[in-house]
Amino acid sequence: MIRLRGHHLVCLHYYHGDGLNDAYAVNLKQKVELAQRGEAITIAGGADDICAACPNLRESICQGIPAEEGEILKLDRQALALLNCKVGDQVRWDHVLQQVQSAPP
């Protein structure tokens, strides 16, 4: 099972790990490949399996820039509203992809 936070459910269809470090990019690619193969995804309410390899994660909180954690949580809420999901739900990558593709621009 993969744990993904709200905005990762949307962003990972477009973002491929550029800009941080190799470990982050490799981890991201591995998690996306698992999801694409049908691995169950549980929606996390904070730091998830992608965040785990991020160099900005400290004590389960993003320390990239001041106040970033609050902005990330806001993105999570917006993404979950778009996908009509909530923390704790289990979803499949193909279902999320359909939701993302059918979302208004």
Image (spheres, helix red, strand yellow):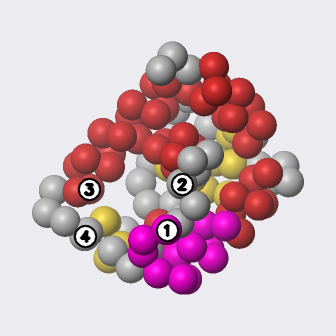
The residue indicated by pointer 3 is 69
Sequence order check, earlier mark of 1 and 4:
1
Report the side of 48 relative to 93 (left or right): left
Helix, strand or loop for the magenta stretch, by majority: helix
Q: Amino acid at mark 4?
A: Gln
Sequence order check, earlier mark of 3 and 2:
2
Q: Residue 60: x percent and y percent?
A: 37, 68
Q: Which numbered mark, 1 or 4, is in the foreground of this view? A: 1
Q: Amino acid at mark 2?
A: Tyr
The residue indicated by pointer 2 is 15
Question: Counting other residues with Cα less than 10 Å from the Cα at mark 3, is it few (<14), some (14-19), or many (20 or more)?
Answer: some
Query: Which stretch appears magenta?
Result: 18-29
How many numbered discs sit on the rendered protein? Answer: 4
**Measured Cα–Cα span from mark 1 to mark 4:** 18 Å
Query: Are the residues tagged 3 and 1 within 8 Å (C-beta)?
Result: no
Q: Is residue 28 visible?
A: yes
Question: Counting other residues with Cα less than 10 Å from the Cα at mark 4, is it few (<14), some (14-19), or many (20 or more)?
Answer: some
Q: Which numbered mark, 3 or 1, is in the foreground of this view? A: 1
Q: Nearer the viewer, residue 13 or 72?
A: 13
Magenta-span inclusion, residue 63: no
- Please state, as top left, top right, bottom left or bottom right, where the N terminus lies in the image: bottom right
Q: Amino acid at mark 1?
A: Asp
**Measured Cα–Cα span from mark 3 to mark 2:** 19 Å
| Residue 18 disc label | 1
SS state under label 1: loop
Q: Which numbered mark, 3 or 2, is in the foreground of this view? A: 2
